[in-house]
């Protein structure tokens, strides 16, 4: 992309200018998602947010409106943002052949099938990487590709239960409490898949050799417990939920009910933060005698908890938030989504944005800047004074010209054939002149394109793979395109 299209990233850029669209590190990368729910689409969203052209393969029955066995629609307005949609019957020989031709233009493929399903379709790693040796083939399962349980059905809760993690979550003397499907599906599965794909893409760019990435929800969730495994080895953590420093065992790292029936989070672990918490609530004379830092010894926890519970419980959440405003005591009211969305700090950073359909969307993360493109990236004042996200990026549909969610140019393709029709989808971006709003104030990000309609980009994507109009028509006549 030219500097004119991106905007100046010089440290000497005038502070009155709107921030330039931030870099999209995976711009120019084409990845095909063969389908699935949960971690695969989440990994695809992360990669699309990073600039990749993410092509979601939808089935003909999805184009016909089949919501599937769990009542989900074929397009999630958040998980599928910034993607492009191609309808293709992968159970037909013609559909498989068309996909294999598309894969020749791609840098990566991801799938969330049970082990062996992709191979049965003729779309396994050996099938696809023989034709495209630099291809990265990412796959995510609950139990892994091997092992006695590999082919068992399951969901997030089952995988973290099997890995041992679930037994550690919750309060003492209560049932294990699973954190929705964050630990297995998304933290353990989807995010590790996205990281694995990016790492393998880097290897492929250096060596010319692709890789198969096996991301497993159980493995990934197990990895998330790494610090606690280290604490256990140091004698600082013991097995059993609700008995340790960070699992509600310690009174200084827990949630407390307020006088008005709401809750606040308290995390005053370090001595200076604990001291400030105690001072703000004027409760020093009610606590047991302790030297600095001794509050972390479990022998004091029951007595400290009783004092904290009474002190917090006698005040409303609003009173506590006023008491601790601007304080380093590590106290934060537990907000609803609506409260978080309206919070001035979150508004300044555009932690949330509303898309054209008024869907609440989480901001892409992490955020990037060229050297000098932000106050935290080597510029003294270039972006720090840009103001709130609304000032920096404007309303939906405004903002600086940006690179969209990918150029639509994958390995072996050219912009003329692989880009879309302007604002239609993720890959259309800069090549078609589409602009997405720049949000985020002093830490800007490019707002992803909206989720596509099922099959919205079918014909143009097939054309980018080299299929002629007659071949596309034949596919449609065969039923392979729905």
Image (cartoon, rainbow, N blue to C red):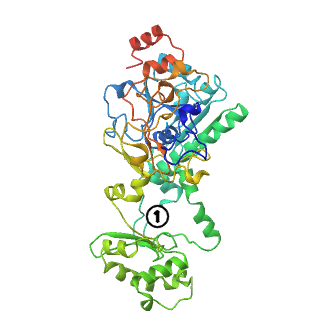
Residue 396 as seen in the image, left or right of residue 191: left
- Give the percent coordinates (x, y) of residue 342: 34, 56
In this rendering, the answer to whether 140 lies above or below 261 is above
The residue at which mark 1 appears reads as: 169
Q: Is residue 431 visible?
A: yes
Q: Is residue 93 visible?
A: no
Question: Regarding mark 1 in the picture, which secondary structure is present there?
Answer: loop
Q: Residue furthest left?
A: 260
- Give the percent coordinates (x, y) of residue 125: 60, 30
Q: Residue furthest top?
A: 470
- Give the percent coordinates (x, y) of residue 175: 40, 66
Q: Residue at x 63, y 27 (%)?
A: 129
Point out the image quarter for the C terminus: top left
Residue 250 as seen in the image, left or right of residue 200: left
Q: Which quadrant of the view contains residue 25?
A: top right
Residue 193 as seen in the image, left or right of residue 481: right
Q: Residues within 10 Å of mark 1 (few under 14, many from 20)?
A: some
In this rendering, the answer to whether 167 lies above or below 27 is below
Point out the image quarter for the N terminus: top right
Q: Residue at x 50, y 69 (%)?
A: 246
Q: Residue at x 33, y 43 (%)?
A: 359
Q: Residue furthest right?
A: 207
- Give the percent coordinates (x, y) of residue 279: 45, 83
In this rendering, the answer to whether 196 lies above or below 61 is below
Is residue 449 or residue 59 the one in the foreground?
A: 449
How many numbered markers are drawn? 1
């Amino acid at each position: 992309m030219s500097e004119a299209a991106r905007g100046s990233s010089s440290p000497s850029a005038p502070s009155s200018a709107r921030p330039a669209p931030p870099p999209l590190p995976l711009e120019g990368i084409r990845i095909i998602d063969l389908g699935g729910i949960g971690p695969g689409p989440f990994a695809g969203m992360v990669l699309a947010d990073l600039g990749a052209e993410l092509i979601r393969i939808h089935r003909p029955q999805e184009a016909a409106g089949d919501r599937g066995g769990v009542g989900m629609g074929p397009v999630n307005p958040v998980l599928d943002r910034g993607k492009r949609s191609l309808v293709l019957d992968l159970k037909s020989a013609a559909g498989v052949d068309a996909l294999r031709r598309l894969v020749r233009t791609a840098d990566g493929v991801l799938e969330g099938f049970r082990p062996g399903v992709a191979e049965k379709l003729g779309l396994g790693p050996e099938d696809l990487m023989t034709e495209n040796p630099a291809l990265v083939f990412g796959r995510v399962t609950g139990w892994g590709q091997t092992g006695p349980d590999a082919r068992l059905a399951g969901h997030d809760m089952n995988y973290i239960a099997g890995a041992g993690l679930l037994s550690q979550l919750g309060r003492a003397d209560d049932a294990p409490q699973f954190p929705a499907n964050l630990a297995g599906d998304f933290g353990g599965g989807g995010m590790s898949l996205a990281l694995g794909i990016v790492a393998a893409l880097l290897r492929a760019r250096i060596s010319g050799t692709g890789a198969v990435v096996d991301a497993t929800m159980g493995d990934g969730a197990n990895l998330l417990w790494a610090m606690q495994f280290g604490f256990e080895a140091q004698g600082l953590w013991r097995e059993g939920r609700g008995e340790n420093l960070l699992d509600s065992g310690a009174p200084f790292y827990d949630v407390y009910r307020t006088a008005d029936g709401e809750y606040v989070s308290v995390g005053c672990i370090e001595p200076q933060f604990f001291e400030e918490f105690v001072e703000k609530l004027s409760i020093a004379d009610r606590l047991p005698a302790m030297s600095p830092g001794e509050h972390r010894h479990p022998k004091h926890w029951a007595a400290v908890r009783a004092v904290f519970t009474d002190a917090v419980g006698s005040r409303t959440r609003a009173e506590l938030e006023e008491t601790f405003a601007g304080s380093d005591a590590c106290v934060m009211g537990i907000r609803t989504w609506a409260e978080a969305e309206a919070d001035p700090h979150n508004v300044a950073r555009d932690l949330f944005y509303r898309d054209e359909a008024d869907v609440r969307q989480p901001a892409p993360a992490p955020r990037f800047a060229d050297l000098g493109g932000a106050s935290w990236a080597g510029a003294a004042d270039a972006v720090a004074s840009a103001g709130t996200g609304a000032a920096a990026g404007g309303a939906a549909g405004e903002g600086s010209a940006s690179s969209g969610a990918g150029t639509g140019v994958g390995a072996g393709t050219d912009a003329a054939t692989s880009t879309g029709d302007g604002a239609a989808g993720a890959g259309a971006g800069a090549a078609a002149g589409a602009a997405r709003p720049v949000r985020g104030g002093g830490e800007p990000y490019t707002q992803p394109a909206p989720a596509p309609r099922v099959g919205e980009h079918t014909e143009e994507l097939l054309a980018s793979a080299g299929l002629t109009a007659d071949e596309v028509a034949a596919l449609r006549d065969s039923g392979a395109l729905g």
